[in-house]
Image (spheres, rainbow, N blue to C red):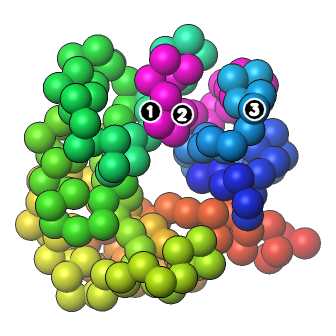
Amino acid sequence: MTDDDRLPNALEVAMKMPKNWGLIFRNYKNPNRYFEALEVAKICKFRRITFLIGANLKIANQLKADGVHIPEYLLKSKIINTIRNLYSKKIITTSAHNQAGVRIARTINADAVLLSPVRKTKSHPKAFIIKDHPFSAMARLNKIDIYALGGIKILDKRKFLSLGATGIAGTSIYLDRIKTAV
C-alpha cells in the first residue's frame, strides 16, 4: 500500500516490490494522482504486479487496473449498491476495523478484506487494536479472504496465517523488506 506520508513514491515501490505482491495505490493527497497512477499502472503491468486503485472507481476503470480498494467509510454510502455490479470482473478489496465492517464487505461480495489495525501503527497511533483472538475468530468464521493490516512486520506473516489470515498487508511490510534487502 502506498501512503501519502510514509511511502509517497509509488513509482519506486512498483519498481522494487516483489513480483508476487500486489500494490494498492492510495496517494489521495497527490494533485497529480491520475498521472502518477497511470505510470505506476504501466510498471505494474510490465512487472506482472497486481494493481489496485484506492477509493476511486473511475480511475481504476480508466487505467484498467486489476481492481479497486474501497475504504470502509465509503461502503456506508450509496456506493455499496453499485460496486460489484459495475466491477464484477475486477478485484474488490475493502478495509474493515471490526466484525460489522467485515459483514459489509461480504454483502458486496468483496474479494478480500484488510482487517486493521492488528498492531500499534504510526499512521493511527490511537486506534483500537484488534487482538489475536478476535482477529482469528473473524478470519475463520467469515467466508471471505482476510488480510492482517496495521503495524505488521514481514516476520508476522506466519503468525497471522496461523490465526486464519489469507495473508498480510501494509506499508511497514514494504519498508521492512527494503531495509533487510540493503
Q: Which residues are magenta?
A: 36-60
Q: Hey, which quadrant is residue 57 in on the image? A: top left
Q: Nearer the viewer, mark 2 or mark 3?
A: 3
Q: Is residue 167 left or right of residue 18?
A: left
Q: Mark 3 belongs to which amino acid?
A: Pro
Q: Secondary structure at mark 3?
A: loop
Q: Mark 1 belongs to which amino acid?
A: Val
- Residue 31's disc number: 3
Coordinates of residue 108 in the picture (x, y in percent): 17, 35
**Residue 59 lies in magenta, yes or no?**
yes
**Residue 96 lies in magenta, yes or no?**
no
What quarter of the picture does the C terminus occupy? bottom right
Q: Residue visible at 15% across and 61% down? A: 100
Q: Is residue 120 left or right of residue 178?
A: left
Q: Residue visible at 22% across and 57% down? A: 101
Could you tell me if residue 19 is visible in this image?
no
Q: Majority secondary structure of the magenta segment? A: helix
Residue furthest toward the right? 182
- The reply to whether discs 1 and 2 touch (Cβ–Cβ < 8 Å) is yes
Q: Secondary structure at mark 1?
A: strand
Q: Is residue 143 left or right of residue 50?
A: left
Q: Is residue 142 left or right of residue 3?
A: left
Work out whether residue 50 or residue 59 is closer to the camera in this orientation and state it: 59
Could you tell me if residue 35 is visible in this image?
yes
- The reply to whether discs 3 and 1 touch (Cβ–Cβ < 8 Å) is no
- The reply to whether discs 2 and 3 touch (Cβ–Cβ < 8 Å) is no
Q: Mark 2 belongs to which amino acid?
A: Ile
- Residue 68's disc number: 1
Q: Nearer the viewer, mark 3 or mark 1?
A: 3
**CA gap, disc 3 to disc 1?**
19 Å
- Residue 53's disc number: 2
